[in-house]
Image: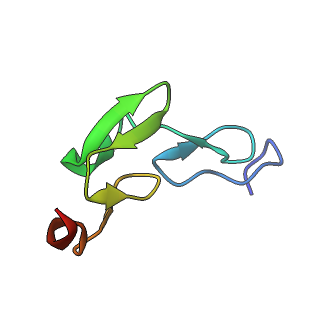
Amino acid sequence: MNGGGSTPCVSPWCGEKCELLNCDETDCNGNGVCTNGSCKCKAGWFGSLCEKSCPHIWSWL
């Protein structure tokens, strides 16, 4: 805990309770676009930072 009584956040999280995502810092891992503080993932990617892939999506196409 810091002197302010709150837990310091680990990047890319911010906010009073580390509840906000600062996706500008991560650039959505190159797999999406940061819009209004959240990642909008490209097809085949998911997760709050577009860090997880859906390997089977290509077999559906």
Residue 26 visible in rendering: no
Residue 45 can be seen in this image? yes
Placement of 24 over or under 12, stated as above or below: above
* Residue 14 lies in quadrant: top right
Instruction: Identify which residue, 37 or 55, lies in the foreground.
Output: 55
Task: Name the quarter where the N terminus is drawn.
Answer: bottom right
The image shows residue 25 at horizontal and vertical percentages of 35, 38
Q: What's the residue at 54%, 47% (across, down)? A: 13
Look at the picture and state if 11 lies above or below 15: below
| Horizontal and vertical percent position of residue 35 | 42, 27
**Is residue 52 toward the left or the right of residue 1 in the image?**
left
Query: In the image shown, does 2 or 15 lie closer to the viewer?
Result: 15
Figure colour scheme: rainbow
Residue 24, percent from left and from top: 36, 33
- In the picture, measured across the screen, residue 4 lies left or right of residue 46, that is right
For the residue pair 30 and 4, the one nearer the viewer reads as 30
Q: Residue drawn at (43%, 58%), measured in percent from left and top?
A: 47
Horizontal side of 50 relative to 17 (left or right) equals: left
